[in-house]
């Protein structure tokens, strides 16, 4: 407890209670012991009232409340199942990179640098259709399921593309979510105990930038474990090679992991992971506490780290001695769609007018984000190797006069439009952002109705939805960013219903089938030009999330802001 | 009494069946495609069709209603699509926490509210009466989520007397109780304001009744008049209110579970709603409907027991 936060005042406690109070004030007495003693001593209301002025607890107290060997993380949303192919994330959000490892990974830090993990080497053939791998030897799976072999890699990847059943007792409807992460993978050939080859119908460039080092679908599981355990037991306690193994998993309550004593060292020596135990408090998705209630568990000393807190709480806690983190997530982005097939928005001049009317810095400010999160092109410069970045992308600054002129040219007056975030929870600040958009468009004579809940037809019916605002997650390859805007995604994730056949052809063609960075970047720029020309999208900002830890906790994040809990440290 | 019981049971069963039918239909009334929300960003037309088929959404509406009703009667409420766990398992894990919270809250509400009401009725206009009158306004006006937040910030964050997060472990009763107290108090606070005023008013009204005057005239002691003759009649409206109290408490558990990060039916329902996880939504709401119907049934029976003049019509006019 911070001495400078204490205030004096209140009634003086009776003599027999003063010892209890002092011990509490020194944090030498935990709450259970206090209540026991208080019950025995009959602590009076006057005593209680004297506590009201003991001041806010700081990060120091949180540290005192737990051991340094257990990291308590949360409350956070559960990932659904912990199967790499059937989960809510498909990106390296905890606990996936803690339990599992892939052939490659992007280590924590700010630079995108894929390094070998389970793989000794990964090499793509000259024609790009074969990717050969050699595994490190002697890397054990958890719980005695043997060492990693090429058979496990074959099983993991062929399971992803549907060539192997998800579980030996899989129902007909059990299907992997993330098969598209492997493009045109046809099979994995085992050429030795530790060697294999992935064979593709045509080259799939994102494999080495996205699938193997980043996506959960690239993580390796134990074939022997899945076959031995069956669906229910596998999902209850799956098996990887990561530095921590699962002790228990209750999706709406808690995930407990302990250090894997026989860790094979694929990502460094076992001693580099300081925690004996990592406990995640899990709260049913979207029922998690928000605002100050979100940080209450940390302030009460019940957890050591919590993520996705609001800026005001971050500021308050920083002054209270806690560690506050704001790792950028440059590849995640917020955007506004304009439905090009809606009669009110069919005229491109109307869409251009709306784009001119919107004040992006105001949208960023209302989310309490730094102004440098503004996107200067759809594929941002922070993409690995600046792959796909368009440095000369036009910047659409606010120009009310130009917007009015375009509307006048289009012969549009007294226009009224709906706006919604059809994906519930897509962006927690969506309501505030939509208010800004409403005010911006009012300046050019467009009335906007904010609809907080909309039926599914808002997306699925091309003549229903009008404006939509949300946030999408991104990945370290332009393929991941572009894939939602093809013709086939109309009514699913392409809420603009914009369909450009050349764009879709490039997405399925040169963007993924060419492996040279320069060629792929040129393709990505062409695709961005088409998107920009359509005026169907307004890119507003990339995202960043505040998180906070107890005093002395040093958190670690990958270049897109995903926390890697095994690298958290106490200093 | 038997006829009354049978009628009341029949009505309760009808309410549960109608609730189940409405729940089966609700999937078509709420916006959002459940299959797409479950699949997230990697939804493809094929996967969406597959999950819709798994959810039974490709069948006719009457068939969906029948499947749900017949499944519920067999104890098969389907499988959760997000966690791939049988829904009955999820309900079995979550319900004890919610029931414990509701029972603790009802116990605290009655255990504090009624004795306090009796105390102030003994000395109307006294210091305690004036104090409870003033405090009651505050407690009645505060929504349970505000009370919960205040309690959380004061007693968990600031004073650290109670845990802020979770439901605790059943293997450690003391820990479980500590996790239970703040949320239960948050739900009871409203009734600590309301029940004393109600008990006071009914007691004072009964105390002016002719039979009380007669008892006093016969020389019956004041304590006997107050606790034996007056209290029994004064308590009848309070018992009639128990159904409402239970309903308020059950709905309040949703706020309490979210604010305190407790595993329970309320947090499960909210999560399932946002994910359009229909098997879970239907099961949780059905469980709430069952608890609510059962609570009202018990309250009505108790009411009838205390006042045999009560008929079905009167009971139904009450706060059911």
Image (cartoon, rainbow, N blue to C red):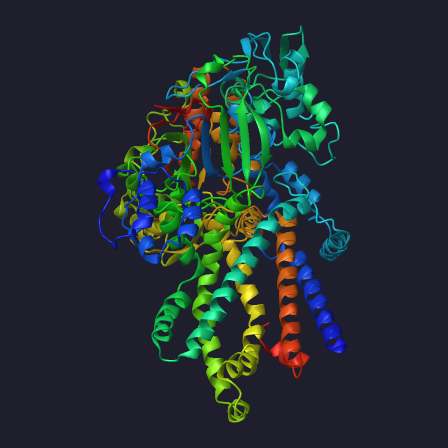
Image coordinates of residue A353 in percent, x first then y, are 34, 46
Relative vertical location of residue A25 with respect to residue A414 in this rendering, above or below: above
Between A392 and A469, the residue placed more toward the observer is A469
Screen quadrant of the N terminus of chain A = top left
Q: Would you say B304 lies left or right of A41 here?
A: right
Relative vertical location of residue A223 with respect to residue A248 in this rendering, above or below: above
Is residue A114 among what the camera can see?
no
Image coordinates of residue A436 in percent, x first then y, are 33, 49
Q: Residue visible at 64% across and 37% down?
A: B47
Q: Residue visible at 55% across and 77% down?
A: B237
Q: Would you say A94 lies left or right of B303 here?
A: left
Between A147 and A172, the residue placed more toward the observer is A147
Q: Residue visible at 73% across and 73% down?
A: B5
Q: Residue visible at 34% across and 42% down?
A: A24
Between A4 and B296, the residue placed more toward the observer is A4
Image coordinates of residue A448 in percent, x first then y, are 38, 55
Between A111 and B295, the residue placed more toward the observer is B295
Image coordinates of residue A173 in percent, x first then y, are 71, 36
Relative vertical location of residue A405 with respect to residue B50 in this rendering, above or below: below
Q: Would you say A130 lies left or right of A394 here?
A: right
Screen quadrant of the C terminus of chain A = top left
- Residue B240 lies in what quarter of the image? bottom right
Is residue A434 among what the camera can see?
yes
């Amino acid at each position: 407890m911070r001495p400078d936060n204490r205030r004096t005042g209140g009634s003086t406690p009776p003599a027999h209670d003063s010892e209890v109070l002092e011990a509490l004030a020194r944090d030498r007495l935990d709450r259970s012991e206090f209540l026991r003693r208080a019950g025995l001593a009959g602590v009076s209301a006057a005593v209680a009232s004297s506590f009201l002025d003991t001041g806010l607890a700081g990060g120091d107290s949180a540290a005192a409340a737990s051991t340094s060997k257990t990291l308590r993380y949360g409350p956070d949303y559960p990932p659904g199942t912990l199967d790499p192919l059937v989960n809510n994330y498909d990106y390296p959000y905890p606990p996936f990179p803690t339990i599992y490892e892939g052939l490659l990974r992007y280590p924590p830090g700010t630079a995108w640098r894929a390094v070998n993990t389970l793989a000794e080497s990964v090499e793509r053939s000259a024609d790009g259709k074969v990717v050969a791998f050699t595994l490190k030897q002697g890397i054990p799976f958890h719980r005695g399921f043997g060492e990693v072999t090429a058979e496990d890699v074959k099983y993991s990847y062929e399971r992803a593309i549907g060539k192997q059943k998800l579980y030996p007792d899989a129902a007909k409807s059990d299907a992997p979510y993330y098969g598209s992460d492997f493009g045109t993978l046809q099979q994995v050939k085992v050429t030795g105990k530790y060697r294999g080859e992935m064979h593709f119908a045509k080259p799939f460039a994102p494999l080495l930038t996205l699938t193997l080092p980043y996506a959960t679908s690239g993580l390796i599981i134990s074939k022997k474990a899945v076959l031995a355990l069956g669906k229910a037991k596998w999902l209850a306690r799956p098996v990887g090679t990561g530095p921590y193994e699962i002790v228990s998993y209750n999706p709406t309550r808690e995930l407990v992991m302990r250090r894997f004593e026989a860790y094979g060292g694929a990502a460094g020596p076992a001693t580099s992971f300081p925690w004996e135990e990592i406990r995640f408090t899990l709260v049913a998705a979207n029922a998690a506490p928000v605002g100050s209630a979100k940080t209450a568990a940390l302030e009460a000393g019940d957890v050591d780290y919590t993520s996705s807190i609001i800026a005001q709480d971050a500021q308050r806690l920083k002054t209270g001695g806690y560690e506050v983190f704001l790792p950028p997530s440059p590849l995640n982005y917020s955007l506004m769609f304009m439905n090009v097939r809606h009669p009110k928005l069919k005229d491109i001049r109307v869409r251009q007018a709306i784009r001119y009317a919107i004040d992006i810095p105001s949208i960023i400010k209302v989310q309490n984000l730094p102004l440098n999160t503004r996107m200067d092109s759809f594929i941002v410069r922070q993409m690995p190797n600046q792959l796909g970045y368009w440095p000369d992308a036009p910047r659409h600054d606010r120009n009310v006069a130009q917007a009015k002129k375009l509307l006048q040219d289009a012969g549009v007056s007294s226009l009224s439009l709906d706006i919604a975030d059809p994906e519930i929870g897509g962006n927690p600040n969506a309501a505030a952002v939509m208010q800004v958009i409403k005010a911006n468009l009012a300046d050019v004579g467009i009335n906007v109705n904010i609809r907080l809940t909309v039926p599914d037809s808002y997306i699925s019916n091309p003549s229903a939805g009008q404006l939509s605002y949300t946030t999408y997650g991104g990945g370290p390859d332009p393929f991941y960013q572009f894939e939602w805007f093809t013709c086939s995604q109309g009514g699913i994730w392409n809420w603009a219903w914009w369909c450009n056949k050349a764009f879709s052809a490039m997405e399925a063609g040169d963007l993924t089938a060419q492996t040279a960075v320069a060629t792929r970047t040129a393709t990505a720029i062409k695709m961005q030009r088409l998107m920009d020309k359509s005026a169907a999208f307004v890119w507003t900002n990339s995202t960043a999330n505040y998180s906070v830890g107890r005093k002395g906790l040093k958190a670690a994040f990958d270049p897109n802001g995903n926390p890697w809990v095994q690298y958290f440290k106490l200093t | 009494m038997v006829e009354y019981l049978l009628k009341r049971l029949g009505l309760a069963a009808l309410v549960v069946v109608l609730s189940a039918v409405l729940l089966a239909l609700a999937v078509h009334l709420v916006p959002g495609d459940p299959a797409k929300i479950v699949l997230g960003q990697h939804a493809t037309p094929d996967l969406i069709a597959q999950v819709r088929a798994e959810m039974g959404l490709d069948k006719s509406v009457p068939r969906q209603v029948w499947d749900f009703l017949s499944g519920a009667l067999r104890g098969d409420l389907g499988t959760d699509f997000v966690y791939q766990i049988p829904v009955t398992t999820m309900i079995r894990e979550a319900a004890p926490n919610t029931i414990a919270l509701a029972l603790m809250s009802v116990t605290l509400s009655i255990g504090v509210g009624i004795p306090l009401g009796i105390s102030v009725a003994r000395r109307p206009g006294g210091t305690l009466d004036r104090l409870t009158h003033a405090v009651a306004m505050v407690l009645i006006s505060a929504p349970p989520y505000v009370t919960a937040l205040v309690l959380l910030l004061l007693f968990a964050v600031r004073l650290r007397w109670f845990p802020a997060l979770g439901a605790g472990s059943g293997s450690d009763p003391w820990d479980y109780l500590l996790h239970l107290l703040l949320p239960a108090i948050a739900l009871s606070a409203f009734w600590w304001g309301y029940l004393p005023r109600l008990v006071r008013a009914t007691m004072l009204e009964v105390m002016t009744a002719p039979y009380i005057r007669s008892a006093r005239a016969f020389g019956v002691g004041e304590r006997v008049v107050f606790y034996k003759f007056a209290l029994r009649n004064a308590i009848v409206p309070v018992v009639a209110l128990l159904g409402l109290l239970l309903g308020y408490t059950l709905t309040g558990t949703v706020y309490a579970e979210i604010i305190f990060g407790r595993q329970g039916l309320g947090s499960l329902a909210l999560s399932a709603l946002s994910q359009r996880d229909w098997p879970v939504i239907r099961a949780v709401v059905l469980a709430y409907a069952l608890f609510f119907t059962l609570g009202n049934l018990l309250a009505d029976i108790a009411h009838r027991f205390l006042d045999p003049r009560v008929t079905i019509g009167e009971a139904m006019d009450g706060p059911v």
